[in-house]
């Protein structure tokens, strides 16, 4: 048994659960509940506090993704080298990593721009809807990343 490979895979999966799972739950459960139970003027402050609490876990998850992802890629027999997309696995990994970059970009935009706007606007309907849409996009991107991972793993 390759303990290093097992450990890297476990950490990669754990980071997946933490990062993608929190956005799926935000989109499907937490944000709709908060939106229906908290006054619009207070929603921004609650979301800012939630973002502050999540930030460390997000950063740690991304760091773990990068480190374990590099290791797991280099260990995979289907890996053909940087820029070589000569098999289905490499193409799926390219798509996955494009989705990951989009996920990170939307996540940063959501936290830096949208959460603050909800707080500044005291929960205007437009800013609240934009935040809800961003959480939905993050959840969809996260699920698509998982799909690419599953498809590549099935090859």
Image (cartoon, rainbow, N blue to C red):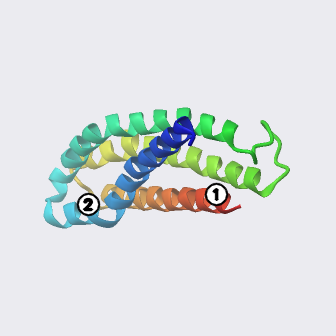
Out of 55 and 124, give the one closest to the viewer.
55
- Residue drawn 14% across and 59% down? 39
Picture quadrant where residue 109 is located: top left
Q: Which residue is mark 2?
A: 30
Out of 73 and 54, give the one closest to the viewer.
73
Q: Is residue 119 left or right of residue 111?
A: left
**43 up-or-down from 81: above or below:** below
Out of 144 and 132, give the one closest to the viewer.
144
- Neighbor class of circle 1 (other Cα within 10 Å; few <14, some 14-19, many 20+) is few
- Residue drawn 58% across and 62% down? 147
Q: Which residue is mark 1?
A: 153
Q: Residue furthest front?
A: 1
Q: Position of residue 21 (x, y in %)?
A: 38, 55
- Which element type, helix, strand or loop, lies under badge 1? helix
Q: Position of residue 86 (x, y in %)?
A: 85, 50
Q: Is residue 91 left or right of residue 38?
A: right
Indicate which disc residue 80 carries.
none
Q: Is residue 85 left or right of residue 108?
A: right
Q: N-terminal of the two: label 1 or label 2?
A: 2
- Residue drawn 21% across and 65% down? 33
**112 up-or-down from 124: above or below:** above
Q: Position of residue 129 (x, y in %)?
A: 35, 62
Q: Position of residue 152 (x, y in %)?
A: 67, 57
- Neighbor class of circle 2 (other Cα within 10 Å; few <14, some 14-19, many 20+) is some
Instruction: Kindly report the distance in space between the C-alpha atoms of the residues bearing marks 1 and 2.
Output: 31 Å
Out of 124 and 97, give the one closest to the viewer.
97
Mark 1 in CB contact with mark 2 (< 8 angstroms): no
- Which element type, helix, strand or loop, lies under badge 2? helix
Quadrant of the snapshot with the N terminus: top right
- Residue drawn 42% across and 62% down? 136
């Amino acid at each position: 048994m390759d303990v290093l490979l097992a450990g890297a895979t476990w950490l990669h999966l754990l980071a997946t659960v933490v990062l993608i799972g929190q956005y799926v739950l935000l989109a499907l459960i937490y944000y709709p509940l908060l939106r229906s139970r908290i006054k619009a003027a207070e929603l921004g402050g609650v979301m800012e506090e939630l973002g502050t609490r999540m930030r460390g876990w997000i950063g740690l998850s991304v760091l773990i993704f990068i480190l374990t992802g590099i290791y797991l890629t280099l260990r995979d027999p289907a890996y053909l080298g940087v820029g070589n997309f000569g098999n289905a696995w490499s193409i799926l990994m390219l798509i996955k990593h494009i989705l990951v970059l989009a996920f990170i970009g939307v996540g940063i935009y959501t936290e830096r721009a949208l959460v603050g706007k909800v707080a500044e606007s005291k929960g205007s309907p437009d800013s609240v809807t934009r935040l809800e849409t961003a959480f939905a996009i993050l959840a969809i991107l996260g699920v698509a990343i998982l799909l690419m991972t599953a498809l590549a793993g099935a090859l």
